[in-house]
Amino acid sequence: MLDQLPGQARLFLESFAPAAAAQPSHPLVSGLSSFALIAAAIIGYLGVAIMVYGAFRAAFDFVRSLILRNNHLSRLRIELGKHLALGLEFLVGKDIIESIVEPTWNDLGKLGAIIMLRTVITIFLTKELKEVEEEIKVEREEVEVEREERALKKVQEK
């Protein structure tokens, strides 16, 4: 990458690179680096697995809800949203670990963009989940009021 830059820019950037960077790294450093990359991969796979599990579970529950004619769409949205938000958090952790091990300006820029995008998605998911939970709360209160009105009507009729 540095070879593609004009002479002055290349010399400027190379002045920031420590001379030790050209030498082979210590076995402990390369071992920790390998461990961190393996840990990042595992964390990333966990994040994807959580999101896939949530999607399959929501699809299964949705089909079951259709068959049984239950209206549990709000609860399904909440559960799916929780799985997606948690999975995204795992993926952000994976990206952070990877950028610590092999930081380049290009990777750090991509990481910043990815983290910002995932954070915005998580914020909107959280907002959506709160709104759906509020809707469920209002619906429960309305059902409770209807029950009380029916019970009161029955008592008045007797």
Image (tube, grey):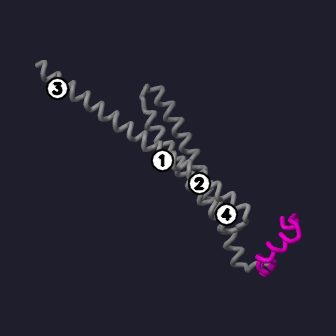
Tell whether position 116 is magenta.
no
The residue shown at (71%, 61%) is 107
Task: Measure the C-alpha gap from mark 3 to mark 4.
Answer: 64 Å
Say what amino acid the circle numbered 1 marks.
Thr
N-terminal-most mark, 2 or 1: 2
The residue shown at (55%, 45%) is 53
Residue carrying label 2: 46
Say what amino acid the circle numbered 2 marks.
Leu
Camera-side residue of 75 and 127: 127
Say what amino acid the circle numbered 3 marks.
Leu
Say what amino acid the circle numbered 4 marks.
Glu
Quarter of the image holding residue 23?
bottom right
**Tag 2 near tag 1, CB within 8 Å:** no
Task: Measure the C-alpha gap from mark 1 to mark 4.
Answer: 26 Å
- Farthest residue, direction left: 158
Mark 4: secondary structure: helix
Residue carrying label 4: 98
The region drawn magenta spans: 1-23
Task: Measure the C-alpha gap from mark 2 to mark 3.
Answer: 53 Å
58, above or below 113, in the image: above
Residue carrying label 1: 126
Residue carrying label 3: 152
**Tag 3 near tag 4, CB within 8 Å:** no
Give left or right: position of 95 versus 8.
left
Where's residue 44, x and y in %?
62, 56
